Image (spheres, rainbow, N blue to C red):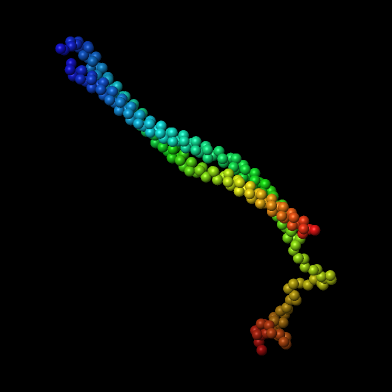
């Protein structure tokens, strides 16, 4: 059973078909651009991740700062002992 | 008529298939990006934890180092005082003699210039002098 279409309806249908095809092509083009941009974002995120990994490797040794401060305190304590010792010896030498 | 129907169906199918394909591609990309960003967030938290101990630790070291640097000259002074106190001092002569040049008396070369060699002289000039 066939549909009876007028010439105008047929032309409009063909127009819709070609228009739809053009829309498909345009959508494919825009989505391709979207994929390319997302791919660029992905690569740059990977670069950021690698940089952050290097930064973590660089800052891992900051835990040594606190023991270093304690060692410097020990040096100061030893210097105070030297001060007391030299003070006693100097008093004996002068007397 | 049939051609138009088929083309219409193909048109719609292309649109749906294209959208599905790109949705799948973009979805997989975004999933990968999300995974990487989650790892980045963890790394940033780790860096923050590592960096938090830097400032108080360095302030501690600088404060203690400043105290040490300020105390060292005092220790030097005390050590120098001890050294000066225990170093032996040579006895000074009670009567000092006249000051004489350290080089001694200078030898005259006038005799050498005229070829005269005094008796008993054994200088190098005597070997050069004739006779």
Q: Using the rendered image of the protein, determine whether residue B88 is visible from the camera's viewpoint.
A: yes
Q: Relative to the observer, which residue lies in front, A59 or B117?
A: A59
Left or right: residue A32 versus residue A13 is right
Left or right: residue B14 versus residue A52 is left
Percent of width and height locating residue B74: 72, 52
Assign the N terminus of chain B to one quadrant of the image: top left
Assign the C terminus of chain B to one quadrant of the image: bottom right
Q: Relative to the observer, which residue lies in front, B31 or A93?
A: A93
Q: Is residue A32 above or below residue A66?
A: above
Q: Residue at x 21, y 20 (%)?
A: B7
Q: Relative to the observer, which residue lies in front, A8 or B60?
A: B60
Percent of width and height locating residue B21: 30, 28
Q: Quadrant of residue B117?
A: bottom right
Q: Residue at x 31, y 25 (%)?
A: B19
Q: Relative to the observer, which residue lies in front, A84 or B26?
A: A84
Q: How many marks?
A: 0
Percent of width and height locating residue B69: 66, 49
Left or right: residue A26 versus residue B44 is left
Q: Quadrant of residue B9?
A: top left
Q: Residue at x 63, y 47 (%)?
A: A73
Q: Using the rendered image of the protein, determine whether residue A25 is visible from the camera's viewpoint.
A: no
């Amino acid at each position: 059973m066939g549909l009876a279409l007028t010439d105008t309806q047929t032309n409009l249908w063909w127009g819709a078909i070609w228009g739809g095809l053009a829309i498909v092509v345009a959508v494919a083009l825009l989505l391709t651009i979207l994929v390319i941009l997302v791919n660029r974002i992905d690569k740059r995120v990977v670069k950021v991740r690698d940089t952050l990994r290097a930064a973590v490797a660089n800052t891992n040794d900051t835990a040594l700062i606190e023991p270093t401060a304690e060692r410097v305190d020990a040096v100061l304590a030893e210097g105070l002992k030297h001060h007391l010792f030299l003070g006693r010896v100097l008093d004996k030498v002068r007397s | 008529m049939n051609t138009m129907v088929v083309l219409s169906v193909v048109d719609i199918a292309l649109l749906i298939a294209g959208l599905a394909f790109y949705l799948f591609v973009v979805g997989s990309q975004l999933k990968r990006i999300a995974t990487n960003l989650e790892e980045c967030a963890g790394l940033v938290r780790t860096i923050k934890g590592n960096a938090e101990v830097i400032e108080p630790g360095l302030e501690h070291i600088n404060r203690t180092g400043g105290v040490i640097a300020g105390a060292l000259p005092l220790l030097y002074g005390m050590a120098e005082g001890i050294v000066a106190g225990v170093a032996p001092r040579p006895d000074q002569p009670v009567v000092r003699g006249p000051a004489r040049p350290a080089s001694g008396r200078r030898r005259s070369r006038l005799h050498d210039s005229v070829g005269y060699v005094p008796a008993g002289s054994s200088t190098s000039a005597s070997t050069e002098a004739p006779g």
